[in-house]
Image (spheres, grey):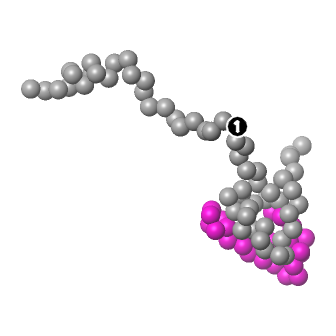
Amino acid sequence: MCCGNNRTRMGRGLPGPQAPRGISGLARPASLTYEYTGRTGLVVVGPVTGRQYRFDRPGARLEVDPRDNASVAAIPVLKTIGPPARPR
């Protein structure tokens, strides 16, 4: 005996799968811009994303993924500038 018809009947009226909803009231961490204050250049690999941040000269500024912020902020030659500038 096949159960295909029973499955169809059982499934009627039930909501389909839905995309997961975010937790309301919690803001997503923002990316930050860092400025390199060292003497030459520096490459930092984000421990969470694996992304390479290449500061090619003193004064170079890069936007860092929010998931890597805590680790990048701990590097003494990188100074937090703030959130990235918005395009005009």
On the question of residue 54 being in view, the answer is no
Which of the 4 image quarters holds residue 75?
bottom right
Q: Is residue 64 magenta?
A: no
Residue 14 lies left or right of residue 8; in this view the side is right
Q: Is residue 52 magenta?
A: yes
Q: Residue at x 83, y 59 (%)?
A: 33
On the question of residue 8 being in view, the answer is yes
Q: Start and end of the magenta stretch?
A: 34-62
Q: Give the amino acid at mark 1.
A: Gly
Q: Residue at x 21, y 22 (%)?
A: 6
Q: In the current view of this chain or complex, which residue is farthest to the front?
A: 25
Q: Which residue position holds label 1?
A: 25
**Residue 87 point in image, percent of width and height:** 86, 46
Task: Look at the numbered disc 1 and give the secondary structure of its residue.
Answer: loop
Residue 4 sits above or below residue 68 on the image? above
Of residues 84 and 75, the one nearer the viewer is 75
Q: In the current view of this chain or complex, which residue is farthest to the left?
A: 1
| Mark 1 surroundings: few (<14), some (14-19) or many (≥20) residues within 10 A | few
Residue 20 sits above or below residue 33 on the image? above
Q: Residue at x 70, y 37 (%)?
A: 25
